[in-house]
Amino acid sequence: MHPSATARANPDKPAYIMAYSGETVTYGQLDARSNQGAHLFRSLGLKRGDAVAFFIENSPRYYELLWAAQRSGLRFTCLSSKLTTGEVEYIVKDCEAKVFVASLPLAETALAAAALIPGVALYMVGGEAGPYQSFEAARSAFPTTPIADQSAGQAMLYSSGTTGRPKGVRRAGTPDASLEAPNPLANLGMMLYGWTPDVVYLSPAPLYHAAPLGWSMAVQALGGTVILMERFDAEDALRFIEQYKVTSAQWVPTHFVRMLKLPEAVRAKYDVSSLVSVFHAAAPCPVPVKEQMIAWWGPIVHEYYAGTEGNGFCIINSAEWLAHKGSVGRGLTAQVKICDEDGEPLPPRAEGMVFFEGGGQFEYHGDAAKTAESKNRHGWTTLGDVGWLDEEGYLYLTDRKSFMIISGGVNIYPQEIENLLITHPKVADAAVVGAPDEEMGEKVVAVIQPMDWDADHEALRNELMAYTRQNLSHVKAPRVIDFMQELPRHQTGKLYKRLIRDAYWAKESSRIA
């Protein structure tokens, strides 16, 4: 399965539509433009296995670049559009990119990074600036027919860096070089979510993240149509489902929360009956949030638990979830193991580190130590999450080990507290971290993004203190509640909790100094 097959059979079919602007790119156009891009990459001396890096927002040119790199056999790395100059420099150098393509809206950061990445060919989509040549103009000089040595490339994406510096993830093994090789995610879409070549898939998240990138390219490999949102807005997402008659979509819990917090009249205004199956991942979903989504959209809400590393894949549908509320499912591609500190398996309902046995192998690019840390003595691999299994093999995640708070010798996982706080009607977002405490070692601190920033913070603080003490054990209830206008959350839903936690510890360090 490859878009070129649909281009031959049905060239006028939309490969993707930009949700806001309505710009439509057909399979025939996608095929021609990606062929031109592949010729350009070859003209620059890039051969199979070489690396390119893209620093682009959700642009109509993104898929043209991705498929150009894919059919050239290249390793492509997609950078977050929110990165700083230093972060761009680090990833471009670390992934060993020979070509760096930025977009005009990101020109300020791209221009600052240009001098820091000597020897890398610089291109820009949507315009040109400084040393960056127009990618569209450069590729237009090349033929729309395929290059002579087509072969399938693959992504090397970087971890989001929520707990440290991001690392490139490289899947083990040699990928099938044939363009006609089966697309694993397309096969999963057909098996789990009923996808056919008629699927209309809404992609509401940034393409630089693994899930939106992988699933939307899988839709195009199958011959479906992607509706790509340039940015996420809760009401607009509902509007686009109705407008484009969307049948499938991938979400993160933050999307659910924001849609559910729309006024009831707004939610009821849009027809979402075209939806056949939706699925979510990337971050924990509070039980009340998921209950409300299933009540609203019906038993079409699926969930999976996996990582960019590709070492395991857990799945659960609505019916299973309603019988196992809070679970992220059972292992599909690997056996789930819960292990103690020595890497030994634990019995059902015992909490420990989540490992996968028999799943895909991976390595962190250029970091043998981090790769070794991801494995136990049995060779099983972990993403760093903590959880437990029930007697039927359903996995329940507790939190990431690195987020655990130790207060007075008691282990406290922030996720449970965050899941409670986000259900409060006056809370738009919540983060819970451990801050230094002379007596207890760490204390529980909740940082709240209020629905209404102008509301009385002291009154809200008292209300939330009472709310948590009523619903949580005393040791888990926050001792401090602070407020932020907007939490530092990745557009894929992951919270940059490290940034919040570090601020409290830095404050303590400066006080002691």
Image (cartoon, grey):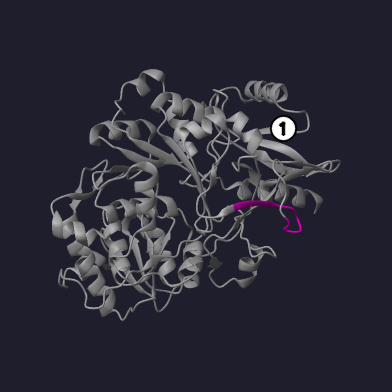
Q: Point out the image quarter for the C terminus.
A: bottom right
Q: Point out the image quarter for the N terminus.
A: bottom left
Horizontal side of 208 relative to 246 (left or right) equals: right
**Identity of the amino acid at label 1?**
Pro
Q: Which residues are magenta?
A: 336-344
Q: Is residue 314 visible?
A: yes
Task: Point out residue 218 in the picture as x, y percentages from the top left corner.
Answer: 33, 54
Identify the image quadrant of residue 104. Answer: bottom left
Determine which residue is flagged by label 1.
478
Residue at image point 46% right, 46% down: 492
- Determine whether 451 is above or below 413 in the image: above
Residue at image point 57% right, 48% down: 496
Q: Is residue 30 visible?
A: no
Task: Point out residue 272 in the picture as x, y percentages from the top left corner.
Answer: 31, 29
Q: Name the outermost residue toward the right.
A: 439
Q: Name the outermost residue toward the front.
A: 392
Identify the image quadrant of residue 109. Answer: bottom left
- Determine whether 86 is above or below 428 in the image: below
Q: Name the outermost residue toward the top.
A: 265
- Considering depth in this image, is 469 or 297 the residue closer to the camera? 297
- Considering depth in this image, is 435 or 276 the residue closer to the camera? 276
Horizontal side of 246 relative to 360 (left or right) equals: left
| Magenta region includes residue 69 | no
